[in-house]
Amino acid sequence: MKLLTFAFALVFSCVSAAFAASGDAPSCSDPAMFPNRIPNYLIGSCKTANDVQLFRWPGGQQEVMGVRTEVVYKVPAAELGATPKYIASNYANAVRDIGGQLLDDPARSTLGDRLTARVEIENSEVWVHLTSDNAVIGGNWLTYKIIVVQKDAAAQVITAQKMLDALNTDGFMTLYLNFDTAKWAIKPADAGTVDQIAKLMLANPQLQLSVEGHTDNVGTAEANKTLSANRARAVMDAVVALGVPAGRLTSTGLGQASPIADNRTEAGRALNRRVELVRK
């Protein structure tokens, strides 16, 4: 799926268009649709993943699947920051400037500290949410967070509920993660799927799973078994890192021994390169 290319600049009212960001977290940048930011704030962290985000606003809610970009801004001291209302109002103005729909308009709330919006850009639906994980200090936000989700109608993010339904019906769930060739490091784009596995297990404390890795038949059987074992272990370790007790998970690699499609075609090989969650 191709990310949107925004060919315009969004100008915040009362926000400087030029801002030195030398103290930003490595490899982080402003969301493409919000190139400017509140003065004195630097990027403390960022992440991007194919994910599911639940957007709520007064009178409604919607679950949106797609490319989720989250950027957290911070100031070193609260007195250098800005009020929630000031921050939210500036982002609301930016959304209005491109014809976006404010579902949760800060101007209509007492505190003016929350924003949820939907924007149509280049025939694609983009959702925006502004919030903070910190309390107001001295009237200002020490941090604030922007979440942008580009909706993908064909998104294949698997939710915890879908995993549970499959496990209850079939006893297993097949996942397709985007590992690099001969590698087992989990990519940021698959972090959302790993999060959903952890969510599934934390919500069902009696559930125990075997994480089983599979490959196509390219390469030797021995190498493929080792590769599949490493990939399964990587998924298991990532889920444990999110708070799931290690004793509830095992991992194993089956290599090329259990294909589910024809290895003579690329489409078939792609189906065989998989990780399965198997109920124990």
Image (tube, helix red, strand yellow):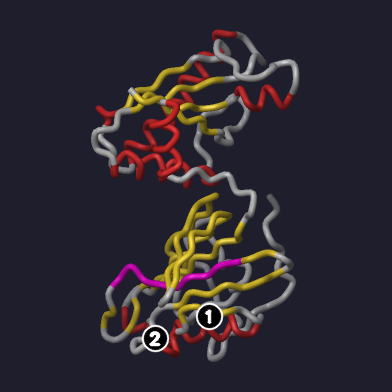
Measuring from the top left, give residue 99's x and y in whole percent.
Answer: 65, 81
The residue that disc 2 covers is 112
SS for tag 1? strand
Q: Is 42 placed left or right of 1 in the picture?
A: left
Q: Nearer the viewer, residue 73 or 155?
A: 155
Please tell me whether the stretch drawn in magenta is mainly helix, strand or loop: strand
Residue 136 or 65: which is nearer the viewer?
A: 65
Q: Earlier in the sequence, mark 1 or mark 2?
A: 1
Most foreground residue, 273 or 40: 273
Asked whether, in this view, residue 83 is left or right of residue 263, the answer is left
Which kind of residue does numbered mark 2 sit on?
Gly
Q: Name the residue that disc number 1 marks.
A: 102
Which residue type carries mark 1?
A: Leu
Where is residue 112? Give x, y as percent: 39, 86
The residue at 24%/33% (across/down) is 206
> Percent x, y for residue 2?
70, 53
Count neighbours of disc 2 (C-alpha within 10 A) and say few if under 14, some if 14 to 19, many if 20 or more: some
Is 43 drawn above or below residue 257 in the view shown? below
> In the rendered structure, does residue 122 fall within the stretch colored magenta?
no
Q: Which mark is residue 211?
A: none
Residue at the image point whose x is 54% and y is 8% from the top: 222
What's the magenta region?
Answer: 126-134
Q: Indicate the quadrant where residue 215 lies.
A: top right
- The answer to whether the residue labelled 1 contacts the one labelled 2, judged by CB atoms less than 8 Å apart, is no
> Which residue sits at x=60%, y=61%?
150
Q: In which quarter of the image is the C terminus?
A: top left
Q: How far apart are marks 1 and 2 (CA)?
A: 13 Å
Query: Which residue does the image show at 45% across and 22% down from the upper left?
Result: 212
